[in-house]
Image (tube, coloured by chain):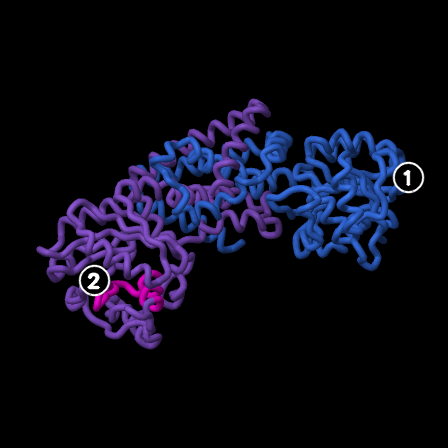
Chain colours: A purple, B blue
Amino acid sequence: MTAKRLGIVGLGLIGGSLALALKGKRGAPEVWGCDRREEPLRLARKAGAIARACTETEIAACDIVMVCVPVVRSVGLIRRIGRRMQPGSVLTDVGSVKTKIVRAGQESMADGAEFIGGHPIAGTENAGFAAADPSLFRGRTSIITPEKGNTEKAMKRVEALWRLTGARMLRMDPATHDHVFAYVSHLPHAVAYALVHSVATLDSRRVPLGYSAGGFRDFTRIASSNPEMWKDIVLQNRTEVLRATAHYRKNFTMLEGLIRRGDEKGLLAYFRTSKRTRDAL
Amino acid sequence: MTAKRLGIVGLGLIGGSLALALKGKRGAPEVWGCDRREEPLRLARKAGAIARACTETEIAACDIVMVCVPVVRSVGLIRRIGRRMQPGSVLTDVGSVKTKIVRAGQESMADGAEFIGGHPIAGTENAGFAAADPSLFRGRTSIITPEKGNTEKAMKRVEALWRLTGARMLRMDPATHDHVFAYVSHLPHAVAYALVHSVATLDSRRVPLGYSAGGFRDFTRIASSNPEMWKDIVLQNRTEVLRATAHYRKNFTMLEGLIRRGDEKGLLAYFRTSKRTRDAL
């Protein structure tokens, strides 16, 4: 069921961790790696994570190719590699936003090859092969976002690959994926960035954060995420993100109203609703 | 320097942890405990955390009394106990909001006794003596908020007590405290509650949170905090909290505008400012 040869395009945190997770695993495919920079290829070879470094053109000879580059570069790469893929092969990716990428994939594939969007829900604030970790996906959920036209065989092949890394698999259509992640990931990042931004723009002599910042520091951890990556994510998922932020802003303004009016009953009900939902996660 | 006899009013998470932290410590005072419920007194005695259970009236015989009840009950208790305190004794508390409590304390004290506000920055989502932990304050910051009229001797006595628990001490005036904590604690809680509330009020068939909620779950941990307690905190610090929420909402709306306009440069600058501030914490 698994592929014989996997090509990974982009040996950063995600691509590198995937390669390391498959290394020496029973049933794992041979891994070819491709990166526009020399350094990650050198590190990946040294770590025994890839059998061979190859070019973007050569990688289309693999029976499964995983695009692991920032979302802003995914669409172009998928278009270029997709039209060179072999019949029976599968092109997939790891981007945090799916609708646009899947549309590009569906439009670009060579005859007999399939594109299936993917999104492993794993990551850290760090980037690059140096931060790669073979256990990054263990126990985490990895999503594929098949569309009409994808075969069960191709889906199973991508899923089998991720399962070798210890991930649980989930299927979701691309639009649902982008809606859900607008709420569970993109909105929380927007909120955390805005919260830290609002403190950053205050007079620091009046809000000395340094010493008292235990809880604040934990809470705002995700505001340390990569600015380039997050700019691209919120823009690629702009429509859903703006729907989510508008809905959130309405809820936040409602809370401000309860505080302003000193509405004890209303505040209690509001906080209890939130606590009940959070406790059930 | 330390007190000979400490009275703790309210043997919940904070009061109970304080009693346990002092147990068997060299130089620690004898601890008397007072609680309107029987259960925490029973548990505290069983754990050897208090030498004696006493009434609210009796506790005023201690040379330092620490009020460890929810902020909504603090003011009333401080008024009742304050007027019975002995000359040379100190009444203090652990509330998350200081201006109102300190004002009540300053107004209510018996001649020769002093009130000094306090706020140990420690806690968990759990409550009650059953959740008490002798190491709760170790390595954490504990704040006292003295006012004009407090003597250096009384401040040092409260500080020495907290230092026995392993806490670092910090002094801050009550107004600065409430301003800073509006930003580093009350606003983040409001944001987390509102974020979960906005998800709770969505159609759950469209946003299935259960499986994908890793990051969301971590980020919203503080929305599992005690609703009664947080209702009282945001209301007691209403003016500062509403200033902070208005400033935050302005920053959030600014971010929405950048996303709506597809302003890549602006988004990058915004996220970078936040990341720089967060990384420096």
Examine the rendered structure and indicate whether residue B144 appears above or below residue A81.
above
Work out whether residue A170 or residue B34 is closer to the camera in this orientation and state it: A170
Amino acid of disc 1: Pro
Q: Amino acid at mark 2?
A: Ile
Left or right, A126 with reference to A240: right
* Image quadrant where residue B84 sits: top right
The percent position of residue A125, horizontal first and vertical second, equals 42, 57
Please check whether the numbered discs 2 and 1 fall on a single chain. Answer: no
In which image quadrant can residue A85 be found? bottom left
Q: Residue at x 74, y 31 (%)?
A: B75
Q: Which mark, residue B77?
A: none
- Residue pointed to by mark 2: A64
Instruction: Residue B9: say if magenta.
Output: no
**Camera-nearest residue between A181 and A201:** A181
Read off the magenta span.
Answer: A2-21
Identify the residue at image location x=70%, y=32%: B100
Q: Residues within 10 Å of mark 1 (few under 14, many from 20)?
A: few
Q: Residue drawn 24% across and 44% down? A: A99
Q: Is residue B137 visible?
A: yes
